[in-house]
Amino acid sequence: MAGESRRPEESPLFAPFAELVLVAHAEPLLRQLYPWTGMWELHFSRCTEIRHTWDIPYIGTRGDGRYCVEGPSRTSPRIADTDSAQAAVAMVIDRLPPHCGPAFIGNAEELAAYEKERDSR
């Protein structure tokens, strides 16, 4: 019925998204980061609190079961589409910024201040 909410596990995106999360979790480099999700997308942040960093590509789950790698920001061009969660995760790992991880406890502004102080020494 129109207007009724659907349980997430009833979505056609549920199975491919669950696979994506499992594949990403298996990667030690990504486990060091703070994962967050929204709109069937898997994001990674270099800090643990909101406002998160937007310097790492993210992976979206498409309705046809495929994945799209985008970012790092919403205005960045799409990197690629792929049929494989493994390929999508590999694309993110290949594009991680230097000195990425473990996640900084705090928000993006606090991380930037910490990095500025660290780099000025």
Image: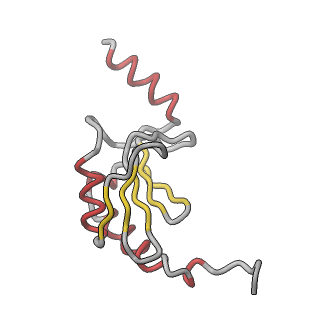
Q: Looking at the image, which residue is at 55% across and 63% down?
A: 39
Quadrant for residue 119, please give it.
top left
Q: Looking at the image, which residue is at 51% across and 42% down?
A: 52
Q: Position of residue 18 (x, y in %)?
A: 42, 74
85 or 3, nearer to the observer: 3
Q: Is residue 8 above or below residue 103?
A: below
Judged from this view, the residue extending furthest toward the top is 121
Report the side of 2 relative to 108 (left or right). right
Count all numbered tags in the image, as a single digit. 0
Question: Which quarter of the image is occupied by the C terminus?
Answer: top left
Q: Position of residue 9 (x, y in %)?
A: 55, 81
Q: Is residue 120 above or below residue 32?
A: above
Quadrant for residue 117, please give it.
top left
107 or 64, nearer to the observer: 64
Question: Which quarter of the image is occupied by the N terminus?
Answer: bottom right
Judged from this view, the residue extending furthest toward the bottom is 1
Please name the colour scheme applied to the rendered image.
secondary structure
Q: Is residue 2 above or below residue 109?
A: below
Q: Looking at the image, which residue is at 29% across and 60% down?
A: 89
Report the side of 14 relative to 85 (left or right). right
Q: Looking at the image, which residue is at 34% across and 55% down?
A: 31
Q: Position of residue 56 (x, y in %)?
A: 37, 45
